[in-house]
Amino acid sequence: MTERIKSLLDRTFDKEQAKFRRDVDWKPLLGRFVAEGIGDEARARIGLEEMLKSERPEFMDGERIAFLRTVKQIPDLHTDAEMDARRAAGTAFGEKGVVFNLTADFAPTIRDGLGARLAEIDARLARCRADGDAEGVEFLENARLSLEAVLGLVERYRAETEKRGLVDVAATLAHVPLNGARTFHEALQSLRILHYAMWCEGEYHCGLGRIDQYLFPYYDADIKAGRLTDETALEELEEFFIACNRDSDLYIGVQQGDNGQSVMLGGVTRDGKPAFNDLSRLCLKACGELKLVDPKINLRVDKSTPLEIYELGTELTAKGLGFPQYANDDVVIPALERWGYETEDARDYSVAACWEFLVPGCGMDINNIDAVSFVGALDAALRSLTRRLGDAEMSFEDVKAEFKAEVQRRADALVEKYRHVEILPGPFVSVISTDCIKKARDISKGAKYNNFGIHGTGIAVAVDSLASVRELVFEKKLVTLPGLVSLLDSDFAGRDDVRAAAKAAPKMGNADARADDLAKWLIDFWGHAFDGKRNDRGGIFRPGTGSAMYYIWHTRDVPASADGRLKGEPLSANYAPSLDVPVKGPVSVVRSFTEPDLGQVCNGGPLTIEIHDSAFAMPDGVEKVAHLVKFFIERGGHQMQINTINRDTLLDAQAHPERHRHLIVRVWGWSGYFIELDKPYQDQIIKRVEL
Amino acid sequence: MFFKGCPLRCAWCHNPEGQSAEIETMVRKGGEKVVCGRDISATELADELATNADIMNESGGGVTFSGGEPLAQAQFLLEVIPLLKARGIKLAIETSGYASAPDYQAVVSQLDFAYQDVKLLDAEAFKRWTGGDLSVVQENISWLRKSGVPYSFRVPLIPGVNDDATSRGAFAAFAAGSKIEYLPYNTAAGSKYPMLGRVYSLEGI
């Protein structure tokens, strides 16, 4: 990297930009919204206007891609009381209720400029007025004002750059984003501003999507015309990536680093051709040099992907970045098609904040709207079964049936709960999403795809627990089912032998059919638990194998489990072997976890494994791990993420955080700085099986 | 594939549980007991290893016989090798070379690659540090050079024993153009000794 980039990198990491920041109290604005009874669409627009008006153009020395946040807080647009009232009236919301966890359709606006969007809005607005379409008018008027607010800040930034003699930046801002980008640099600056504005409007977990596809034409034209060399192109990209880390500590998420700035590289184009290109390579190279947690790299691969690309990805893994997260086109694209996504859209898939598969631009899916706890369901099933049957004869088939029924009951309850979901509007993000101006409707009212995603948490613990019940209660008859249930309430008190037997029972991750068969059975029915169900937007419910942060949250509701796990011990993250399980090795883990037909559960949820950093001590370490990923893909795995860690280093980081400021770990679907995580998340990572 | 049992007792051995041919119990720091070693027949072992034939063949990998000293169970190897080759699995060995010439040749001639240790070049030093007779190893190495089996020499660099410049020069001359790898000293070499109730003699070097 160049000196300039190194300097920007260090200063950004050290949060030099924090010196420009200030607090703003948005309560008066919120009070005004309530007092004047301002509608949702207008609130979003006014919030954006006020936010951008409060922003002050500031720059870090040496930067050429401008825009940084100086206002720490985004305005709240509704009071808790207002939201609670809506919930009480039967409306469900996804998280905060705003548009989130999606990827906008940046490409056309980078190409055409916001000026073109304004012209389209005006034309459509005229027709709405003529048609008496009040809703359309309201959306488009607010959309227009939102664009004006963004362009207003751009102009203030431009004026300031002129004042400070930042000639290059001034020239760029004079052209984009009002006009279409002409160069790679202008495209990156345009993207930065559009993305920045989304956060200011209140959207969060805003993904960047397939940047190697939609930015490629600018990069390619510049290279061919000699305006860029490999080195200067890398420099441009590195600066853009650094910019993604500039404001990220202000972005909301469950933990620091959980901000959803996901990028998807590679895969196939809309017409099915291989998409990995020189810009994909450059992105990987830039991340490898910068070693920052953002943007989060995802890489689409398939059976035909050459080992070389897996090795390029693994070089990032070896550096401890916790990405790339791999997605398998051979499994995901057909799965999306089966769920009703059109073929071209399916081929265009990216991921949401963490790993839920979505289509950029035309998707208003809420991919993480809720979760089913398999461990909770099994606990409830064991209790209801023993309550009903007491000491009567029962078989393991009864246990399976009760568990399946309980999972179905919970799935059905979620369908009811989320039948009617309201999404608060986002006029700006709607302008840069597909067809919203054409339809004269905010994206929150519905896009092409309006599906909801449901995580399935604790799969390995649930499978291991079922295997344990089968062995301990029905095969070895070590304990009755009622006996086992009361032991779960007491953390196996007085029966170390039962706990030891539970821990020795078959485990998912050891290529042991006695556990793997149960996993297959579980995923087979879970994959169809929502068949035929729809929300009132016409969308479906998509089951997945992810856990998000529920692997911590769901453990609060359950006692010990039949696999020998004690009360309070966390579940493994996403789709991974249970913590503390002595697994044979990564190959067995991959085998076990690819036994089920994962095309049935493509809401997402990666196989998550931890590799000890010594695996990369030898030069062939990268090749070997690359082969492991390739093996996973060839066996029909859907998604995979690898954490390169060293338990000793993590423990030292807990004791001496100041020595490990750059230590990055993969948490549940994103990479974060270890020392910034809350202790339960740190502890869970330390407990993970190190391969 | 780690075989239990070794005729040598190298002072720097970082797999002390490989030295005895008996099944042993290791006790971890937290008190957890781990049984080290198991009895298995050649067909059982071949079946077990063959479950991973797919990834081995696809990645150009295979099975490496290691230990301990795998040639201490040469007869067993001669049984299991044809069973693995029949499944197309590539085979390699990591050996001290401390075995009878017939055993060494019978096994190694069937393999795709040999990693041959070269620990020390002086007979007296070899005896002192490993307890063995260097000429046994030298005879096998002479055969290996002419055997046509692809190989690489491996030198574990032990501070104060063989890592000085003179030794390096001697090792390079010994290799005489063949591939030679120098393995850095494993500073955690002593970590498993307490688990077996033993003391690591080279602590702190």
Image (spheres, grey):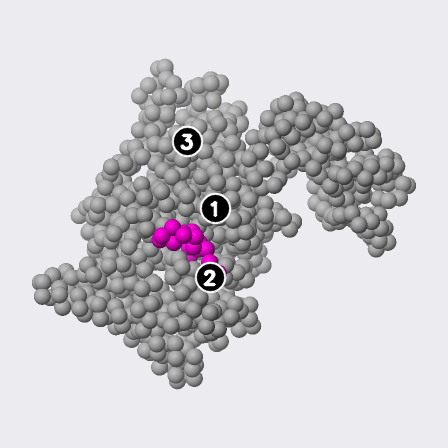
Residue A266 visible? The answer is yes
Instruction: Point out the frontmost of discs 2 and 1.
Output: 1
Give the number of the disc on residue B141.
none
- Same chain assignment for discs 2 and 1: yes
Residue at left 46%, top 61%? Answer: A279
> Whole-Å distance between the Cαs marked 2 and 3?
39 Å
Mark 3 — on which chain does it sit? Answer: A
Q: Is residue A17 visible?
A: no
User: In the figure, A163 relative to B55: above or below?
Assistant: below
Measuring from the top left, give residue B189's x and y in whole percent: 72, 43
Say few, some or many: other residues with alpha carbon within 10 Å of mark 2 (under 14 / 14 to 19 / 20 or more).
Answer: many
User: Which quadrant holds residue A22?
Assistant: bottom left
- B181 vs A84, nearest the viewer: B181
Q: Which residue is mark 1?
A: A304
The residue stretch that appears in magenta: A263-278
Residue holding disc 3 = A520
Specify whether A190 is left or right of B56: left
- Rendered image: mark on residue A279: 2
